[in-house]
Image: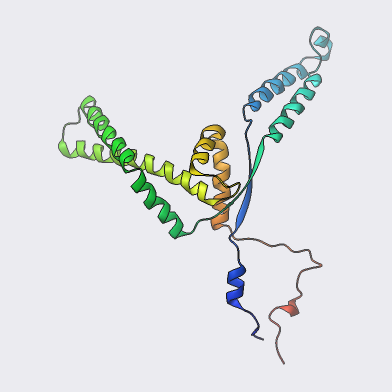
Amino acid sequence: MTENTDFDLDAWLDGAKRTERAVTVYGRGDLLAVIDKLEAEQRTMASIPEADRAMSDGDGSHLQGQIDALYLQLDASKLEMRVTFLDDEEQATIRKEVKTDLKSEADAAAKGAAIEARERCARNEIKVPAEVNQVVRRMTADAENKVIEREVSIRTLSACLVDPVMSPDQVRKLYKVIGDSQLAVITAAYTRASIEAPEVQLPKSLAPSPSDDGAMSS
C-alpha cells in the first residue's frame, strides 16, 4: 500500500471545523391554539351528513384559507439556529463558574429544602435521626442541583450557539417564551453535534473508485 508522504496533518488540523447542526424554532407558538380550534371545526363540519349541511356552514372547506394564513404567520416567526458541541474542558469550566456564581442561590435553595424536609418528616412521623438526615440530605442536594443544572444548561446553550450568537440573559428569555418542547429540539441538535459523526453520501459519479484508495504498488 502506498503512503501519502505529501499529507500535512498539521494543516489538516488547522483547517478542521467543529461539527454544526441546524435547527428551527418558532416564536408564535400561540397561533397553534387557533389552528387547532379551526381544524377541529373543520373536522366537525366535514362529519355532518351532506343532506344536513344546508343548515350548517358547509363542509368546513372555507376555513382552510384562515388555517393557511395562520401557518404562514407561524412560518414567518421561525428562527433558524446553528449549534456546535463543547469539549470536556469547556463544559467543566461552565460548571465551575456556575457553582461559584450561584453559590448564594444554591445555599439558599438548600436551606429552604432542609426546612421543608424536616417539616415533611414531622408530618409523616419520621423521627429516627438517621432517617431524618437522609431525607434532609436528599432534598437539599436536589434543591442545589436544580439551581446549578438550570444555569449550566442556559450557559451551555449560550456557548454552543454559532448563529445567532446569544448571551445567557437572552437564552433565559428564550427559555421562557418557546417552552420545553422547542428547547428539546435545540438540545437534540446539540447532542447530534456532540456525538453523531458526519455521514457523507457522494453521488456515484463523484465517488472515488476502488483503485483510488488502497491501491497496491507494483
At x 28%, y 34%, the residue is 113
Q: Work out whether 49 lies above or below 140.
A: above
* In front of the other: 186 or 10: 10
Report the residue at 71% width, 34% height from top. Answer: 76
Residue in view at x 57 percent, y 34 percent = 178
Where residue 32 sits in the image (x, y, percent)? 65, 27
What is the quadrant of the C terminus in the image? bottom right
Q: Position of residue 62 (x, y in %)?
A: 81, 19
Q: To which quarter of the image does residue 27 belong?
A: top right
- Of 13 and 202, which appears nearest the observer? 13
- Looking at this view, is 134 or 73 the one in front? 73
Q: Position of residue 124 (x, y in %)?
A: 23, 27
Q: How is the image coloured?
A: rainbow
The N terminus lies in quadrant: bottom right
Lateral position of residue 16 relative to residue 76, left or right: left
188 sits to left or right of 39: left
Q: Position of residue 217 (x, y in %)?
A: 70, 89
Q: How many marks?
A: 0
Q: In this rendering, is residue 30 above or below 48?
A: below
Residue 72: image quadrant is top right
Q: Residue furthest bottom?
A: 218
Q: Nearer the viewer, residue 78 or 97?
A: 97
Left or right: 129, with 150 as reference point: left
Rendered image quadrant of residue 54: top right
